[in-house]
Image (tube, rainbow, N blue to C red):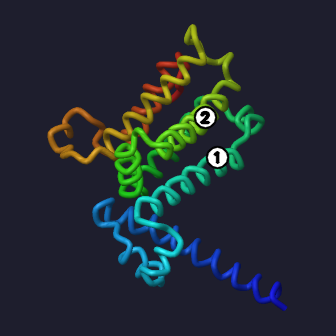
Amino acid sequence: MAQKTLAPQQARSRESTRKLLKAAAEVLGQHGIEGTTIPRIAQHAGLTPGAVYRRFPDKDALLETVIIGILERQDERLRMMLTPAMARQIPLAVFAEQLINTMLVSYRANAGLMRALRQFAQGRDHTTFYRKVTRMEMRTYQYLVELFLVHRKEVKHPDPQMAVSFALVMLISTLIELILVDHDMKNWQAVIPKDDQSLKRELLRSFLSYLRIEQKNT
């Protein structure tokens, strides 16, 4: 009898934890690090603050779990949605265009959360948590490099692996600077693409040009 009652209790506990982690991510994206408090997270999850503290000793421990979970799911989705065999069937220029479009849409839609995640992680740059985050980000990044390198023969740059790696660094850095860095972009409007369609076009042009891939119809 004890085992029969234990299973539903464990299921309810897992569901409560799932709701808690989801609520924490949503609050973090909406309110930033400073505005993310245990009472606010608890209210969003439909729990009491005491229920949160029974699972996590403090806000930092909760957010560390949230961030690790987000990075793990991001890496899993990428590997499930796109394998090297699938990437091989997509022309390199088309693959680059799809990636840039997906990244730009994602950065725009999740800017608040991504900004808060970066700020939280960077504030713990000498911790085990930070090292784990860095390893996970590099794992996903290296997988992207591998996907592009299935088209290695198309890359006319003398060092295809370095070129793909650095092209991705430039792409990600540009998106971070234009979307995630919290500063006034008004003074830069004259020297950056005026809308996201133009931005995607210029990001793709620069990405392919660096790899020395001819882009048609630009």
User: Which quarter of the picture shows residue 37?
Assistant: bottom left
Residues tagged 1 and 2 counted as in contact (Cβ below 8 A): yes
Amino acid type, residue under disc 2 in the picture: Leu
193 left or right, relative to 99:
left
80 left or right, relative to 216:
right
Residue beneath the point at 55% across and 50% down? 71
Q: Nearer the viewer, residue 188 or 61?
A: 61
Q: Nearer the viewer, residue 162 or 53?
A: 53
Residue lying furthest bottom in this view? 1
Give residue 201's mark: none
Residue beneath the point at 19% across and 36% down? 190
Residue beneath the point at 21% across and 43% down? 185
Amino acid type, residue under disc 1 in the picture: Leu
4 left or right, relative to 114:
right
Q: If the image is split into quadrants, where does the N terminus sit?
A: bottom right
Give residue 78's mark: 1
Mark 2 = which residue? 144
Element at badge 1?
A: helix
Question: Disc 1 and disc 2: Cα gap in Å?
Answer: 9 Å
Residue 129 coordinates in the image, percent (x, y): 49, 46
Q: Would you place residue 173 above or below residue 102 in this image?
A: above
